[in-house]
Amino acid sequence: MLKDLWAYMRSKPITYGLATLFAMLSNLIGMVPNRVVETFVDTVVANQLSNQRLMTLMLTFLLAIVTLYLVDLSWVILILGNAYTYVKDLRHHFFKRLLGFRAPFYERFRSGDLITRLSSDMDMVGDFLGYGFMMVVGDCFRCVAVFVVMLLLYPAKLVLISLSPFILFSVIMYYVSQTFDRLYDQKRDAVVALNQEVLESVEGVRVMRAFGQSETLQTNFANRTQDVVAQADRLNPYFATFGSVPNIFGGLSLAISLTYGGYLLGQGQVTLGQLVAVQMYLGMFHMSIWGLSEIIVMYRQAMISYGKLTTLQTEKGEPDQEGNLPISQIEQIEFRDYSFTYPGAKLKSLDHISFKISKGQTLGLVGKTGAGKSSLIRQLLRQYPLSHQGEILINGQSIENFDLSQYESLVAYVPQEHILFSKSVADNIYFSNPQADESSLDQAIIAADFKKDIVNLNQGLDTMIGEKGVAISGGQKQRVSLARAFLAQGDLLILDDSLSAVDAKTESQIIDNLKAQAQDQIKIIVSHRLSAVEEADLILVLDQGKIIQQGSHQELISQDGWYQAQARRQGYLKEVSPYETR
Ligand SMILES: Nc1ncnc2c1ncn2[C@@H]1O[C@H](COP(=O)(O)OP(=O)(O)OP(=O)(O)O)[C@@H](O)[C@H]1O
């Protein structure tokens, strides 16, 4: 962390150079009042205090503290302002990385963990850069400056003996901070678990209520908060140690200096003014040590937080080989003997899949639940690393050769679970194509058969839909997601079981609209209802990752097999197939 922060500070030489200069200046000016008091005391003891002398001393004192205030204000504003900018840049950087990560990453990192990393962990690093820099530069310089000035102005033996308790203090702090790291890490984990609990509870609150599990929810939450308290309780003595131990050693140092200084005063080796001034310098030294012990705490916390951010930095997010071949349209998709196994899984989810589909055609994907339909889609969406067992070709070239973001911009996708944002209905639809005009928006809404619903929304298209679209029905959410995909006008439209929440009439209306509107598109429709794929040019029936049947609706319906059995269940056929009885 220190190396990275140092590199950052070096990239802003003027800011940090000026701040360091001002910090040094501040510490030097901060010693002027001590010198004034020393002179004052010695002048009083020598009975030489005239009004003019008193006025000069007081004016010097006042000037010193006003200048000190102005200098401190300048460098503190400079440093803190810069720390906020640093955290802002860090957030942008990691947010961009998060957007680049694929599904396996999100399966490993929980949302609560990521929120903690992007919020409190980053703040902690920013605090260290801001307050930490202030303390390190200010307190370190003050320690050294006070030590040197004391050695120059006062008897070395008095200075060294007075400061000796701080050596023991450093040793104790070193050992205490070792345990602190471990406990702080545990407390952070407890906070992550609490964040996760809150997220899941808010998302699942309706399900929990429906199952009468509100109390369980409360108990879980209470347990998580109790964990945080327990971890904090274990950590508090260490915080207290960092805060109070410097006071003990500071007090010890003062006591030693008074005792030994009193002895030297009796011997005539120091003046009373010098003895008073030494106490004031020791006070400054003590303040610096106290500040430095605070900075140790902050440093330890920032180190742990930075470690968490570094993990995100070293995580491999992008698909294995990001190609750079430009792509402006998708004309053909081909799976050539392609197999895929999820990372860590034993069984193949796609097993020797081969098919080809071209511009203007529709592919239907059907099959039992867990057959591999969504897995096939996820491969096309590049959500998982390619297996390299077989090939996926786009326009005759391996999919991994293409520039990913260009390829993605040609794909319009409606996932199984509709994700809507806390924005208006219109904004949710415009999301896929913010430049689209109103007439395109209208067409997309008509195609998704959502027009008739708008009148029922209290503010029409401007109706805000809460997190995950709580204010509208499941079928409406699905059609908002569809309209969003239609507005994207991509070359490839993928509907992953996206018509499940609409009735049969609406479904057939949407399918007709689709056919009429985007004739050049390649469409892939995953569905449990055969009516959604009935008019597809090619239908694949999947089972355990394999294609067990393929053809058009008419071909499949006349073949003995899963499709025919489904057709009968869904009212297409009357007679019983032998497949159904197996
Ligand atoms: N992220 C994952 N990690 C490991 N295995 C997975 C993952 N996602 C799916 N699978 C497995 O891959 C197989 C195919 O799942 P997939 O989601 O593709 O089925 P599906 O045909 O879309 O099912 P459904 O119709 O229920 O949506 C299943 O055995 C499933 O358990």
Image (tube, grey):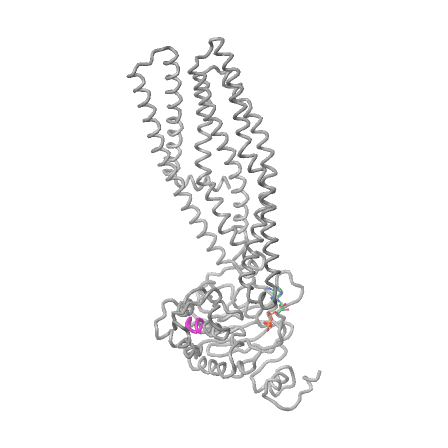
Extreme top residue here? 267
Residue 58 placed where, x, y %? 32, 22
Of the 4 image quadrants, the one containing the C terminus is bottom right
Residue 253 placed where, x, y %? 53, 22
Q: Nearer the viewer, residue 228 or 552?
A: 228
State the image quarter where residue 560 is shown. bottom right
Does 96 sit left or right of 58 as displayed?
right
Magenta stretch secondary structure, dominant:
helix
Please tell me which residue is depicted at 53% across the width and 73% down the height of the picture: 496
Residue 486 in magenta?
yes
Does 121 sit left or right of 49 as displayed?
right
Q: Nearer the viewer, residue 350 or 174?
A: 174
Q: Nearer the viewer, residue 158 or 219?
A: 219
Q: Is residue 89 above or below residue 570?
A: above
Residue 331 placed where, x, y %? 46, 73
Extreme bottom residue here? 575
Residue 493 placed where, x, y %? 47, 73
Q: Is residue 360 above or below residue 147?
A: below
Q: Nearer the viewer, residue 452 or 430?
A: 452
State the image quarter where residue 53 is shown. top left
| Magenta highlight range | 483-488
